Image (tube, rainbow, N blue to C red):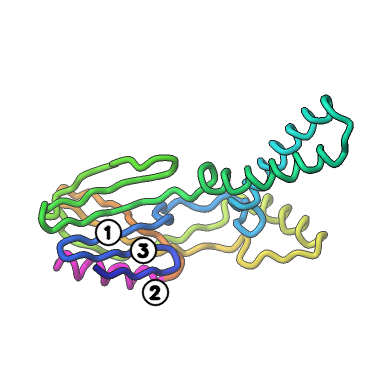
Amino acid sequence: MSSAKFRNYTVITEEDKLIFTTPTYRADADSVLHSGIYNREFSSALVSAVVAGIAYMLVVFNTGNTIVRSLVFLLTFTVSFPFFRKFVFKEGLLEVVFNAVSGEVKIYTSWMTKRLKETISIKNIKDITIESRKHEVENPDAVRFVKQISLQHGTVIPGFGEEKLLFLLKLHLSDGSEKIIYSDSNMQDVITAYDEIKGFLKI
């Protein structure tokens, strides 16, 4: 068994199986909120602070010891942050399992739990292609507002509010339908994934 890990996907190859996993498999445009200012770590920290604040207030009503109250806040935040990051604000994943022995492709999605989304016969995969899709800024007023706020705080967010070009890796099926299994702005990563999967499928 061998494996290769890239920025936004992982490929694990076995003798008769290829497992492709990625958190980036949607082709829709990003929200105006940018990962540089609003990400899973920030969300986890924010919720953890709220939980720690509630615990702090509960202790305030029961003790006047400021050291105890501070320890409760710190301990609650320290414990809740990794919990929320790992179990609540973790990235959703798409896992595609190509099995040459069974002749099937199983597509799983996972967030809180892993779920089988679809099963496809390998014989029904007629082609695998890379296509590009350009996303223009849908809310320029919101982008300008966020940029102004960022500049007032001396912060520059690289790439924020710019048009985005995505490269989509698609499976084309015999019934004319398409399945997007990977999307990324890095064309080289998509090409590498394409070569891995196409080589395994031998199409």
Main SS, magenta residues: helix
| Quarter of the image where one finds residue 149 | bottom right
For marks 1 and 3, the one nearer the N-term is: 3
Give the quadrant of the C terminus: bottom left
For marks 1 and 2, the one nearer the N-term is: 1
Alpha-carbon distance for marks 2 and 3? 14 Å
For marks 2 and 3, the one nearer the N-term is: 3
Q: What residue type is labelled 2?
A: Gln
Q: Tag 2's secondary structure?
A: helix
Q: Give the range drawn in magenta.
A: 187-203
Q: Tag 1's secondary structure?
A: strand
Indicate yes or no whether the magenta region holds residue 198. Answer: yes
Residue 10, labelled with which disc?
A: 3
Q: Do the residues labelled 1 and 3 touch (CB within 8 Å)?
A: yes
Residue 19, labelled with which disc?
A: 1
Circle 3 residues within 10 Å: few <14, some 14–19, many ≥20: some
Residue at 30% of width from left, 59% of height from top? Answer: 20
132 lies left or right of 32 = left
Residue at 85% of width from left, 42% of height from top? Answer: 67
Q: Tag 3's secondary structure?
A: strand
